[in-house]
Amino acid sequence: MTAQCRERLIYNGEEYYLATEPLASYLIKHDIRFIASHTACWRGYIGSWLIEDNKLYLVDLKANISEGNKKFGADKEVGLDFLFPGQTKVFANWYSEVIRIPHGKMMKYVHQGYASLYEKELFLRFESGILVSYREEDNTHFYANKKRMEERNMSDLCEAIFGVKLQKKGNWLHNLFRHLHKLYRR
């Protein structure tokens, strides 16, 4: 899979690019699908977000729709008004997950989803659109230790494909991915 266009977030006056799609759960719940106009954005939309007073807001949307039965190549671009008529800033009260924000220097490019490795990652946890906790991880130790970096990339690959983050080195899924990774490298 091609690396994907990331959504934008303004947080504490800084601009970040997400490795998470906060609008996805809303779209699934309301059975809304957009059309991919190119392979770098299979979800068919890019949102812009703002955290203000610890609340997550959707402030812009560029999405593609098809007026026929196309599955690829949009006929028309729509904006925020398509989902939320008359609103310019939408409180994301549907969002109760974690936003992952890779930032800093890119240490390793991975041509898949959001799997590229950056110096740091910021994790913002939300409950009903309200920021309840955050933490930042320093990933530079992965760059210094190639084996650990490969394990991290394998975990990111699993998360990108299955939506599950590998937790323990000894679990069966981790071993399966390790075996598949060895076969692929031959």
Image (cartoon, rainbow, N blue to C red):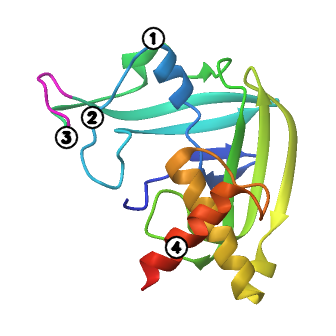
Which mark's residue is nearer the viewer, 1 or 3?
3
* Label 3 secondary element: loop
Q: Residues within 10 Å of mark 2 (few under 14, many from 20)?
A: many
Q: Which residue is mark 1?
A: 86
- Label whose residue precedes the other's in the sequence (2 or 4): 2
- Looking at the image, residue 149 lies above or below residue 16: below
Cα distance between the residues tagged 4 and 3: 30 Å
Where is residue 92 shown, x and y percent of the image? 64, 22
Residue type highlighted by circle 1: Gly
To which residue does mark 2 refer?
35
Tag nearer the camera, 1 or 4: 4
The mark closer to the camera, 4 or 3, is 4
SS state under label 4: helix
Q: Is residue 12 visible?
A: no
Q: Nearer the viewer, mark 2 or mark 1?
A: 2
Label of residue 72 in the image: 3
Q: Nearer the viewer, mark 2 or mark 4?
A: 4
The quadrant of the picture occupied by the N terminus is bottom left
Instruction: Indicate the secondary structure of the residue bearing disc 2.
Output: loop
Which residue is the site of mark 4?
181
Nearest to the observer: residue 174 or residue 142: 174
Q: Is residue 153 above or below residue 144?
A: above
The CA distance from mark 1 to mark 4 is 49 Å
Determine contact: label 3, label 2, CB under 8 Å.
Answer: yes
- Point out the stretch of residues depicted in magenta: 66-72
Dot 1 or dot 3, earlier in sequence: 3
